[in-house]
């Protein structure tokens, strides 16, 4: 499944079909498509200190929700964000 912007598709089709007389049909086809609810994807990185600047002696901290975890994982176990498994210097 792919998500697209209905208004952008309509605009592109109107431009491509300019003068053909099929614009109303294009709008009808676009509007008949089923709507779905999309959940935004959140991303984070594993870092060695909290946002407050306090470093952790062991484990890592998620940049997305500032929670400690004993090891790096693909997803944050606290908020579900997709994690970049490389460490990031919190000062940059």
Image (tube, rainbow, N blue to C red):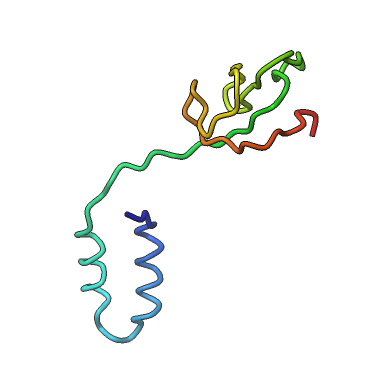
Residue reaching furthest to the right: 91
What x and y, as percent, mark residue 77? 49, 23
Is 72 positioned to the left or the right of 14 in the image? right
Determine which quarter of the picture holds residue 59: top right
Q: Is residue 22 above or below residue 8?
A: below
> Residue at the location (75% across, 28% down)?
90
> Residue at the location (77% across, 31% down)?
89
Q: Nearer the viewer, residue 76 or 4?
A: 76
What x and y, as percent, mark residue 25? 21, 73
> Residue at the location (34% across, 58% down)?
6
What x and y, as percent, mark residue 5? 39, 57
Q: Nearer the viewer, residue 57 or 44?
A: 57
> Which of the image's four quarters has the C terminus?
top right
> Residue at the location (38% across, 80% down)?
16
Q: Is residue 50 above or below residue 64?
A: above
> Which of the image's four quarters has the N terminus?
bottom left
Is 11 positioned to the left or the right of 42 in the image? left
Q: Is residue 17 above or below residue 52?
A: below
């Amino acid at each position: 499944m792919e998500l697209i912007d209905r208004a952008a598709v309509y605009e592109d089709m109107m431009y491509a079909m300019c003068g053909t007389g099929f614009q109303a049909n294009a709008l009808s086809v676009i509007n008949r498509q089923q709507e779905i609810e999309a959940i935004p994807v959140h991303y984070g990185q594993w870092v060695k200190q909290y946002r407050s600047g306090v470093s952790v002696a062991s484990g890592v901290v998620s940049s997305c929700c500032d929670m400690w975890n004993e090891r790096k994982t693909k997803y944050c176990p606290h908020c579900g964000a997709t994690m970049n498994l490389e460490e990031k210097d919190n000062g940059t």
